[in-house]
Amino acid sequence: MRILLGVSGGIAAYKSAELVRRLQAHGHAVRCALTRGAAAFVTPLTLEVLTAAPVYQEEYLTASGSGEEAHITAARWAEALCVAPATAHTLARLALGLADDFLTTTALAFSGPVVVAPAMHAVMWEKETVKEHVATLVRRGVRVVGPVSGPLASGEVGMGRMAEPEEIALALDTLAAPAGTPGPLAGPLVGRRVLVTAGPTHEPIDPVRFLGNRSSGRMGFALAAEAARRGAAVTLVAGPVALATPPSPPGKLTRIDVETAAQMERAVREAAPAADLVIMAAAVADFRPRMPAASKIKKEQGLPVLDLEPTPDILSTLRALAPWAVLVGFAAETANVADLAENARDKLERKRVDFLVANDVSRSDIAFGSEANEVTVFQPEGEPVFFARRPKGELAGDLLDLFAGRLAAGTGLR
């Protein structure tokens, strides 16, 4: 989902950076709003770098001079509002419907689900007024996560510690597919079958070494999570990555783990014929050792000579496997802008895909291992579509909007 994270002024605000990371790992797009007090505990720059988006503070109008009301824009952008930490003062303002800063004004304008994670000293949490404000919020449908018992800022131990970021992230996951409903989004992906590949492949040199690359799998996992949230039945073929299976509505996502390009090819060949949309986000190794050693190669044996051969070109075979599907390829480039475009258009034509998503993996702030990405999408007709740097969870939604448009219009290339 698109989550607006409101951070209020308690010592637990230092956990907001970790909460952003957790939410992004769960496939959500995050933007942040800081109260004046929160800015004393965590800098706006920290959250801006992590979210790849400007941080809202006290400016109600955008700096562009357009007259756009930033709190209304933020409220319309978000699919869920999370306030963590939620101090006693913030809980009171939310319960009373006050609108005396950017966060509470946005909250008053917001009509979607709200999650709050209270954090305060134990004696404050026990006050009757705090309990009444929390009860008021619960009656209105606000989800309250925590607090929990543990060490407090004062050094004492008691109830009032903010719930851990993972627990808050899991609470927000449950909002993505409420029981008995089709989920927050309905559209071209509802009822569709989507195949996504993600991560690298590891091609063995010997039992302990391999040829591989630095792909983390985050982009593919974000695409799989977002497609499942939009109602698709998703098959995720994952290379060797250190990522948990993305949260999804029950029965909507099946994960298949592979290691080598050959194993990924077999998994794709089995799943692709039934797919309506195939997204090849994996960074499949281009070469593999022709004859991997049966035992560990020792240094004493001298410098080994690797005889390499090409791995299966999975993307090139997809049109024959899934002639009616919308096919999406990815191109990891390290060339300049002009070469990137030329290489991407050449690959688009050779592989006979409907979309070719190209990105510059030489940059440290996007692509391999990063939480964010910046891509240019090439199509057989029309101009390329550029998506500026943004969190991969947010980019996944933007890309699926583009791909779903082709699905809604009919089928892929013949």
Image: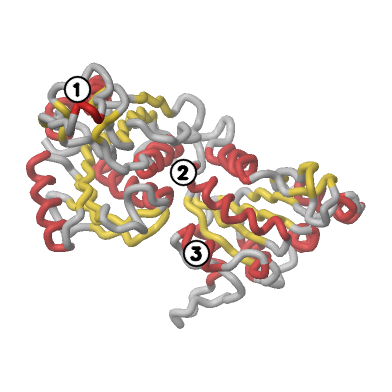
Of the residues tagged 2 and 1, which is closer to the observer? 1
Residue 394, percent from left and from top: 42, 52
Residue position for label 2: 27
| Most foreground residue, 45 or 98 | 45
Helix, strand or loop at label 2? It is: loop
Quadrant of res 211: top left
Helix, strand or loop at label 1? It is: loop
Q: Residue furthest bottom?
A: 65
Residue type at numbered disc 2: Gly
Q: Quadrant of the C terminus?
A: top left
Q: Is residue 183 left or right of residue 115?
A: left
Q: CA distance from mark 1 to mark 3?
A: 46 Å
Q: Is residue 152 left or right of residue 37?
A: right
Q: Earlier in the sequence, mark 2 or mark 3?
A: 2
Q: Earlier in the sequence, mark 2 or mark 1?
A: 2
Is 276 placed above or below 127 here?
above
- Identify the residue at horizontal 29%, vertical 49% (top origin): 402
Residue 347, percent from left and from top: 11, 45
Asked if marks 2 and 1 touch (Cβ < 8 Å), the reply is no
Q: Is residue 349 left or right of residue 114?
A: left
